[in-house]
Image (tube, rainbow, N blue to C red):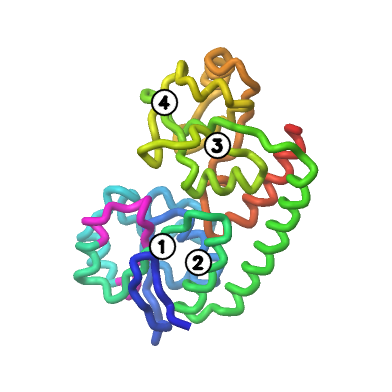
Amino acid sequence: MALVDALGREHLPCEGVPRIVSLVPSLTELICDLGLADHLVGRTGFCVHPRQLLRHVPKVGGTKDVKLDVVRNLAPTHLIADIDENRREAVEAMAQFVPQVVVVHPQTVDDNLALYALLGAIFRRDAEAARLAAEFGDARAHLAAVTATLPREAVLYPIWRDPWMTVRCDTYIAAMLAAAGWDTLPAQAAARFPEFAWDAPWLADVERVLLPSEPYAFTDRDLAEVSVLAQRPVARIDGEMVSWYGSRAIAGLRYLATLREGLA
């Protein structure tokens, strides 16, 4: 089976000892859960899980402001990046001195299965990838069973304020919420993460607001304000469980099943 990433580039299974730099928190966690923590030589400042394993892994900046000279000095054999999370020009610059640059772009819940298989095969961790796939399947089936008994709800999922922003339906976040029976609005938008005003006509169809913990860290004060602005039920939600893919998706699916039942 060809090992092809999101940019259509084919990769070969790793020969020798890999030196991996991960530019995405989700991918860093997945690399560790594939049993590759000892081969991780660089991460971003936002890569914080699993905390104990990452304490001594050097930071290379943020997801959007990677320090190219730091990455170069780490002499990685592999760089792992994401189309949405990282700047294309920075990844292209690092491709000039990193032998293997693997770019991913999960957009649906089940894209996690292909992600496990791709990285598992590249780094010769097929058994670990198969284990994650089995756990994912169990969590996916449980969530489907929970949502089958509940009515679907139209929801607003703000990700920022000043300006207020939300997610488009074709994003990974929206796909995770849809798996839990929560359909994000607006139904159509030009931008993947559109701005919105609280007097937008489509807000009349929103039945619930889900206020996440990231990327904007909404507070109790924000919750009180949104309750007034939306005039709809507002619930807190762990943003990592919805926006982090990879191995975190397994915990995310289980979390959504519990939350969905609790709010029903």
Sort mark 3 into few (<14), some (14-19) or many (20+) by Cα contacts within 10 Å: many
Q: CA distance from mark 2 to mark 1?
A: 8 Å
Left or right of residue 170: residue 234:
right
Residue 82 is a magenta residue: yes
Please tell me whether mark 3 sits on a helix, a strand or a loop. Answer: strand
* Residue kind at label 2, given as amino acid type: Leu
Distance from the alpha carbon under mark 1 to that under mark 4: 28 Å
Between the residue at mark 3 and the residue at mark 4, the CA separation in whole angstroms equals 13 Å
Look at 65% across and 62% down and name the residue there.
136
Return the mark for residue 196.
4
User: Looking at the rendered structure, which numbered label has been put on residue 234?
Assistant: none
Please, is residue 164 above or below residue 238 in the view?
above
Residue 3 included in the magenta stretch of the image: no
Sequence-earlier tag: 2 or 1: 1
For marks 4 and 2, give the CA distance: 32 Å
Q: Is residue 71 above or below residue 240?
A: below
Where is residue 78 shown, x and y percent of the image? 35, 72
Numbered label attached to residue 184: 3
Q: Residue flagged by tag 4: what amino acid is it? A: Phe
- Specify the amino acid type for callout 3: Thr
Q: Earlier in the sequence, mark 4 or mark 2?
A: 2
